[in-house]
Amino acid sequence: MASHGNSSSANDPRQPSAAKPFVAPMVSPQDLPVDYAGFIAVIFGVVGVMFRYKLCSWLAIIFCAQSLANMRNLENDLKQVSMASMFAIMGLVTNYYGPDPGHKVEIPSREE
């Protein structure tokens, strides 16, 4: 059993001198996969602002975070994530701090 370890190193076909570090191939920005999380974040953000759905605005924030974490192309993805986050934040602000759509505001009339 002791000679087993010695004989396996003598018959090892691997060559440490031929080993090279891995270099990732260059991929053009047009060939990168589509960022579905960023696209869904934009859709949820717009729906949250237009129809005043709080859930859609919160989902847009979540998909923005996912898209930000998986960002591959900095220039294009950052534009999409920033637009989606602005829609999501605008939707949350208008939903929580904006006027209540069911509340009617009466303007007092001036009587002379």
Image (cartoon, rainbow, N blue to C red):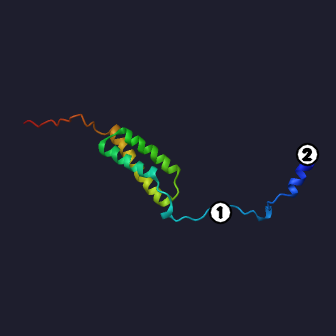
Residue annotated with mark 1: 23
Mark closer to the chain start, 2 or 1: 2
| Residue, far right | 3
Q: Is residue 87 or residue 55 the one in the foreground? A: 55
| Residue, far top | 103
Residue 105 percent across, percent down from the top left: 20, 36
Location of the C terminus (image quadrant): top left
Location of the N terminus (image quadrant): top right
Write the residue at 65% across / 63% down. 23
Residue annotated with mark 2: 1
**Spatial distance from mark 2 to mark 1, Cα to Cα?**
40 Å
Query: Would you identify the image quadrant in which residue 16 lies?
Result: bottom right
Depicted 90 relative to depicted 110: above or below = below
Residue 6 percent across, percent down from the top left: 90, 52
Write the residue at 47% across / 54% down. 35
Q: Nearer the viewer, mark 2 or mark 1?
A: 2
Residue 75 percent across, percent down from the top left: 48, 60
| Numbered badge on residue 4 | none
* Amino acid type indicated by mark 1: Val
Crowdedness of circle 2 by 10 Å Cα count: few (<14), some, many (20+)? few
Q: Secondary structure at mark 1?
A: loop
Residue 58 percent across, percent down from the top left: 41, 40
